[in-house]
Image (cartoon, helix red, strand yellow):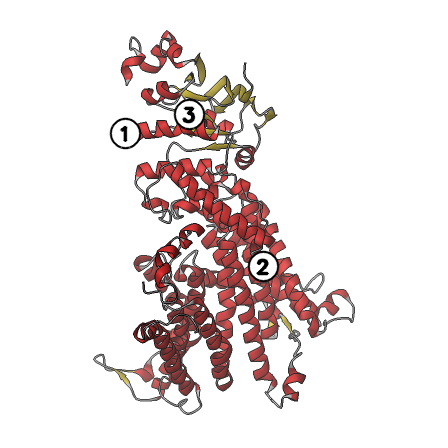
Amino acid sequence: MAGPKTSPKAAVRNLRPLLAVGAYIFVATLITLWLSGPGLRQVLGYSLLLALGFVAFLGSLLVLYYAPIGPNFKLVLGLVILVLLLPLMGVQNTFLLEVATQVGIFAALALGLNIVVGFAGLLDLGYVAFYAVGAYLWAIVGSNQANIAFNTDIFPLAPVWFFPFLLIAVGVAAMTGILLGLPVLRLRGDYLAIVTLAFGEVIRVVVNNLDKPINLTNGPQGIRAIQRPPLFFKPALTALGVTVEDATLYALYFYFLVLLVVGFAVVLTRRLENSWVGRAWTAIREDELAAQAMGIPLVRMKLAAFAAGASFAGAMGMIFGAKQYFINPESFTFMESIGVLAMVIVGGMGSLPGAIVGATVVTILNLQVLKGLSLLLNQLRATDAVIPILNYPLSRWPTQLDPAKYERLIFGILLIIMSILRPQGIIPERRHQLELEERRAEPAPTLAPTAGGGGDG
Amino acid sequence: MAELLLECRGVTKRFGGLVAVNAVDFGVERGRIVSIIGPNGAGKTTLFNVISGFYRPDGGEVWFEGRRIDGLRPDQVAARGISRTFQNIRLFQNMTVLENILVGMHTRVRANVVQVLARSRAFLEEERALVEEAFRLFRFVGLRANPNELAKNLPYGEQRKVEFARALAARPKLILLDEPTAGMNPQEMAETTQLIRRLRDELGITVVLIEHQMRVVMGISERVTVLDYGEKIAEGPPAVVRRDPKVIEAYLGRGAALGSAD
């Protein structure tokens, strides 16, 4: 910093939040790294501990988001966490990488659904249909399935095709969104919800039954051996002398792919939000009639919202299919739509950070906390532990009461609690604050004599 | 006779058996301030809704700047240059004051979606110009609230002003004001009257207003059209209309005098 000298005290004061954030990230990373190592796996309730540590670690992104530090610091630190620290943990414990990838997939879905439900106020209960469209698109051409369907032998397409098809999946999903929207968007509120719900089911049922007359989807058995994206960087890694198992490499690969798509989704959504497009969507949400009187073409803007939301789901569906190596209609049930909707609502409708936090909370609750509780219970069942006061031996605890089996119940309770205590969501929508350019420049002359750096005038 | 900016020819609108507007002829010359008055349920707002495209007339035609506009969607009518306000203020409650005004500029936006996503220079410059203009409109209508406050948190009078600014943001040629002084105290009413005059004098916008406050109607309108049970019963300069026995009977009841209704 070659700028004018500020007093050392002020410099320290300015650095304080940065140091605090850095310290938090450092400690959270160390703890989670320690937890994710092999040493502790036999400890009672280990998965819960690990979940706790991982949440604390991911929480550092939230700390970063709210910390009073410059946007450049935030960006750099955020990238360090996501690109460096998290994969580091992931290599040590691939389960965490899997969780992070799932969080990313759902974050993109939540961001997409947020455009439809949060911005434009169109309740879509069949969102998973677009996810299915993306997944099946690649599954069919990226496996032997297309050969069976069309009687050729040119499939599966080479892995290189993965990337062009990512764009095609975006386009096809967006087109599906428009096709669904055209007949449906004249409906409002509850009616729209019911029809979209039906559409979601229709897609699933079609996929389930399209094994005849032409076997396009292989019906309930699903499609397996789906091509993965190309490992184009592997020769470079080998040349550098880095050897990673293919399984770990793919896990890392999908993590970064998902991260990239989420990054794109965030930037694009943010740009739409702070433009006439986002304003028109929100105006439609707030008052359709007034919006129309302002010259907003309702059908066109609603279709745009549907298409934009669907495109994220299309891209993620395709990545999901390739990652899972196998898909069947079971992956695209109504519950998936509801799950993503729950993420948007828990996070805060219309709020970008909300959608991401919602996706994180719900996914971790699902994959780590509930499963962790079940595991803990199983461990306890093997011991002679009793529930205090009631004196009830845990070994007699029925397996039907496994927390992991109560995912939907717990979701329901969570949603009810949220809607009572914090209906606006964890991170509520915040409107863009606009300033006049000239106004921003105004204070400059008055500060001129002391000129410069410190923001502590 | 000066050129007619807006012309309704025999406009009829029925709701089931009720004829809300019955064969109304109604013309507005460019640059005028005209009022539509009439008792409750006379069909004034229905006529507005027909003009602004929310209702499709069952009979008759609506012409604007020499082109037929009946049958167009409301957003298409707005794009032709007709703005409106609503009887019960319909702001975008959870958007800021400035955003409300910016939404009003929707028909004027040039930047396409690709430019938005790329944050191109054209988009950024346009956006900056729009925001600047929104601030100008904010001052023009005399708003005193925080421009970044949510619309729902504003007091009533300020909300009315936001609605004005939002309607002006489209740079309309014609503005339809549906009871702009409803629920205002005398001072606010005087301010609003002044504002309506400035729309015409400073911005050159033709104004049609529905109004119940006789002080406002008589004070600013150059022509008054009176509706009763969906039919036009009188039309002319306010001084003439107020003495019309048919108007006095229909609007104020038998034997009453319009002038004493203030």
In this view of the protein, which residue sits in the foreground, A12 or A285? A12
Secondary structure at badge 2 equals helix
Tags 3 and 2 both on a single chain: no
Q: Is residue B32 above or below residue A379?
A: above
Q: Residue at 69% across / 74% down in the picture?
A: A159
* Alpha-carbon span between mark 3 and mark 1: 19 Å
In the rendered image, which quarter contains the C terminus of chain A? bottom left
In this view of the protein, which residue sits in the foreground, A368 or A202? A368
Answer whether residue A429 is visible to the viewer in this image. Answer: yes
The residue that label 2 is drawn on is A311
Position in image of residue A51 (x %, y %): 40, 78
Q: Nearer the viewer, mark 3 or mark 2?
A: 3
Crowding at mark 3 (Cα within 10 Å: few <14, some 14-19, many 20+): many
Q: Residue B70 carries which label?
A: none
Check disc 1 and give the amino acid type: Gln
The residue that label 3 is drawn on is B209
| Contact flag, marks 3 and 1 (Cβ < 8 Å) | no
Q: Residue at 21% across / 80% down in the picture?
A: A389
Apparent side of residue A297 relative to residue A394 in the rendered image (left or right): right
Which of the chains bears the disc numbered 2? A
Crowding at mark 1 (Cα within 10 Å: few <14, some 14-19, many 20+): few
The residue that label 1 is drawn on is B187
Looking at the image, which residue sits at the far bottom? Answer: A39
Q: Is residue A438 above or below residue B1?
A: below
Which of the chains bears the disc numbered 1? B
- How many marks the image carries: the answer is 3
Tags 1 and 2 both on a single chain: no
Which of the chains bears the disc numbered 3? B
* Alpha-carbon span between mark 1 and mark 2: 53 Å
In this view of the protein, which residue sits in the foreground, A123 or B245? B245
